[in-house]
Amino acid sequence: MKILYTALFTINLSVMADICPICGLPKDLCVCGEIGKEQQRIRIRRETRKWGKAITIVDGVNDKDTDLGSLAQKLKNFCACGGTAKNGQILLQGDHREKVHLYLMKLGYPEENIELQ
């Protein structure tokens, strides 16, 4: 940003907006993240581990576009449970399939691309 000083007032001159190299739109209008979310097929399933403990597994989230660690942290806070992100999956302690489904829809993932099992 360049600042031009004149005798009466100050004028801020801004340089052209940054342009996204993928879609060619300005950064504030970029739709690359939304297109990426629409192309993912997310699967939410429940498995039983040792001693009959339930675990919710979320897979199919593209870890190149999304930080799985931060998404896992947000899901753990929303579901009030423990868990981790590893090997391209998010593991949550307990059966939280419906809560995870609602939270992913709130983040902008289309409902038809989220499969509950």
Image (cartoon, rainbow, N blue to C red):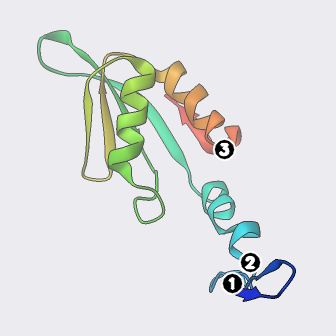
**For residue 89, which quarter of the picture?**
top left
Distance from Cα at disc 2 to Cα at disc 3: 21 Å
Q: Residue at x 33, y 40 (%)?
A: 90
Q: Which residue is mark 3?
A: 108
First in sequence, mark 3 or 1: give its number: 1
Q: Which residue is mark 1?
A: 19
Query: Which disc number belongs to residue 26?
Result: 2
Q: Amino acid at mark 3?
A: Gly
> Can residue 11 be seen at all in this image of the molecule?
yes
First in sequence, mark 2 or 3: give its number: 2
Residue 75 at x, y percent in the picture = 42, 31
Camera-side residue of 11 and 111: 11
User: What SS does tag 1 mark?
Assistant: loop
User: What SS does tag 3 mark?
Assistant: loop
Mark 1 in CB contact with mark 2 (< 8 angstroms) = yes
Camera-side residue of 52 and 107: 107
Rendered position, 54 above or below 38: above
Q: Amino acid at mark 1?
A: Ile
Residue 14 at x, y percent in the picture = 74, 83
**For residue 29, which quarter of the picture?**
bottom right
